[in-house]
Image (spheres, rainbow, N blue to C red):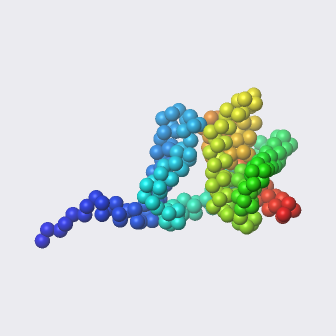
Amino acid sequence: MIREQPQIADIWVYLSGSPLFALVVTLAAYQLGNLLYQRTNKNPFANPVAIAVVLIALVLYLMDMSYQKYFEGAQFVHFLLGTATVALAVPIYKGFSILKTRLIPLTVALVCGGVISIASAVGIATFMGADAAIIGALYPKSVTAPIAMGIAERLTVSPTLTAVFAVVTGILGAILGSFILNLLGMKAWWQRGFAMGVAAHGIGTSRAFAVHPEAGLYASLAMGMHGILGAILIPLLDFYIR
């Protein structure tokens, strides 16, 4: 008896219905984005996260796949966000000796940057008549995504919406950050890196490491400090404002 060979269409239907498919698409999209990033000599406009987001959105649209179904397979990546949050202790530990030598300017920059990031986003959204759920999700958007989602839960707003704003903030910061810092005439790598870490968290830190190791060190330090202070102070700020 000759066994009928499965058709390509049948295989595709099986794979598209498997949760593993979403994980493969996620990893493949990022790898392709990273490849283009390297091929363009690390051009900020070829940000691998931005490319991956566009590719995944295109796949979901073409396959008519819901986000809930996609998340069933991609949730393993989401699980690793917890590990990434704990790993923030590493750059803080490594940069602790540096922090002691520049404690005042770095702390002032961190507080000012955090306050301005909230005031500008919330102020613009309020002025444009945005919904209260959107305004609430903007409060932690400049904190690294894993912590921002935890803050969103404490604020009783959508963690998913907050994560979207955090990723968009990081992508825009990584793409435009270098150009803005150049326009401001900021040349010291520690200053540039710390500014990127405060404003654009993990994605901006990745960009800072690609530009200069000192910038990356200060960016990771800023990202960790911003995450800790944000997790403590943003819920308090929201409580007094509301």
Q: Which quadrant of the figure has residue 206?
A: top right
Q: Which quadrant of the figure has residue 43?
A: top right
> Which residue is painted at 71% across and 62% down in the image?
133
> Which residue is painted at 75% across and 65% down in the image?
155
| Between 53 and 39, the one nearer to me in the picture | 53
* Residue closest to the far left: 1
| Between 117 and 74, the one nearer to me in the picture | 117
Could one spot residue 100 in this view of the protein?
Answer: no
Left or right for 181, reference 16: right
Q: Position of residue 168 (x, y in %)?
A: 63, 49
Instruction: Indicate the quadrant containing the N terminus: top left, top right, bottom left or bottom right.
Output: bottom left
Instruction: Indicate the quadrant containing the C terminus: top left, top right, bottom left or bottom right.
Output: bottom right
> Which residue is painted at 28% across and 58% down in the image?
8
Q: Position of residue 195 (x, y in %)?
A: 74, 40
> Which residue is painted at 62% across and 45% down in the image?
171
* Residue closest to the far bottom: 1
* Residue closest to the far front: 129
| Between 185 and 57, the one nearer to me in the picture | 57
Q: Position of residue 33 (x, y in %)?
A: 50, 44
